[in-house]
């Protein structure tokens, strides 16, 4: 049964939403390789949707910078490069550090409770490097929820929107690094330190820990990409 079979009768807009979510998940999980053509006929067969919702989904993914579109070559999965990866992470530090500071400054007791609950859920997940695909999906959902919880007390819709967009762009790099045995990180300890900084209302420590967390991630991804040079944009 295709995804479309399970969503028949849905309005066209919701079909495009579902196509977008399905294709995005496959790009982030490495099902499609960098620079791989995204041919409408093949995607129609894979997902069971008609051309219209698939084309709309690809257009949205182009806006997310996960695919590229040209008049002559159609849609392709965006290339990856070390330069782009570090640019995304540096920008995440800038955007999310400010949002984190604002959340610590403005967040109420309910915000603290959401952070604690999100961390508790994340800490119950299996090691993402050794998890099965279903377990990994649960981890990814809870990982995003925790990072979002840290920031959502900022009361800044613009910063939250930017952080969500940058999170997705960085996921292509981070998820690929989980499928290697180059190293194991203490994921729980790193996120617990962020949680504790939030609860202690220490803005400077929180920003420093967030920067360290993303920098450590960047160095690990860089090592992974060095071990898989065929995935890296030769021009980058």
Image (cartoon, rainbow, N blue to C red):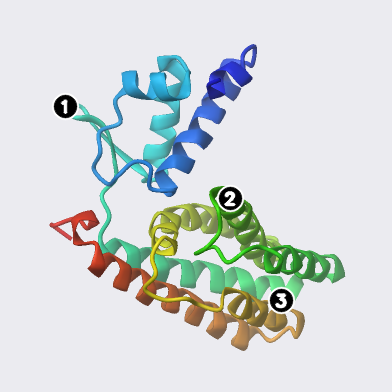
Q: Residue at x 53, y 59 (%)?
A: 163
Dot 1 corresponds to which residue?
72
Q: Nearer the viewer, mark 2 or mark 1?
A: 2
Closer to the chain start, of discs 3 and 1, is 1
Q: Could you tell me which secondary element the residue under label 2 belongs to?
A: helix
- Residue at 30% x, 73% y: name it: 223
Q: In the rendered structure, find residue 186 and report the number of the disc placed on it.
A: none
**Which element carries disc 1, helix, strand or loop?**
loop
Q: Residues within 10 Å of mark 1 (few under 14, many from 20)?
A: few
Q: Quadrant of residue 182?
A: bottom left
In the image, is residue 160 above or below residue 11? below
Residue drawn at point x = 69 percent, y = 69 percent? 123
Give SS at disc 3. helix
The spot of residue 132 in percent (x, y) is 55, 53
- Return the residue nearer the eye: 154 or 126: 126
**144 and 186: which one is in front?**
186
**Residue extending farthest left:** 235
Instruction: Estimate the spatial distance between the alpha carbons at disc 2 and disc 1, rounded to whole Å.
Output: 35 Å
- Depicted 162 relative to depicted 221: above or below: above
Q: CA distance from mark 3 to mark 1?
A: 49 Å
Q: Which residue is mark 2?
A: 137
Sequence order check, earlier mark of 3 and 2 = 3
- Camera-side mark, 3 or 2: 2
**N-terminal-most mark, 2 or 1:** 1
Residue 3 on image: x %, y %: 55, 24
Q: Which mark is residue 104?
A: 3
x then y, percent, for residue 131 = 55, 59
Q: Quadrant for residue 128, please give it.
A: bottom right
Give residue 93's position: percent from left, percent from top: 48, 72
Marks 3 and 1: which is nearer the front?
Answer: 1
User: How would you rate the neighbour count of disc 2 (Cα within 10 Å): few for under 14, some for 14-19, many for 20 or more?
Assistant: some
């Amino acid at each position: 049964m295709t995804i479309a079979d399970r969503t028949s009768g849905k309005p066209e807009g919701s079909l495009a939403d579902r196509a977008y979510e399905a294709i995005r998940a496959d790009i982030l999980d490495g099902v499609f390789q960098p620079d791989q053509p995204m041919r409408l006929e093949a995607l129609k067969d894979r997902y069971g949707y008609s051309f219209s919702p698939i084309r709309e989904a690809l257009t949205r993914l182009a806006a997310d910078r996960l695919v590229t579109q040209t008049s002559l070559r159609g849609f392709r999965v965006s290339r990856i490069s070390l330069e782009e990866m570090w640019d995304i992470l540096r920008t995440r530090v800038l955007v999310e550090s400010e949002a984190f500071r604002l959340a610590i400054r403005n967040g109420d007791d309910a915000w603290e409770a959401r952070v604690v609950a999100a961390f508790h859920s994340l800490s119950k997940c299996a090691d993402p490097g050794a998890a099965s695909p279903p377990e990994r999906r649960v981890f990814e959902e809870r990982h995003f929820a925790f990072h979002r919880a840290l920031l959502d007390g900022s009361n800044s819709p613009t910063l939250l929107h930017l952080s969500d967009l940058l999170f997705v762009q960085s996921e292509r790099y981070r998820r690929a690094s989980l499928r290697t045995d180059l190293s194991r990180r203490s994921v729980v300890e790193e996120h617990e330190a962020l949680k504790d900084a939030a609860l202690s209302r220490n803005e400077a420590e929180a920003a420093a820990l967030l920067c360290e967390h993303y920098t450590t991630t960047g160095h690990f991804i860089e090592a992974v990409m060095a071990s898989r040079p065929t995935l890296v944009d030769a021009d980058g």
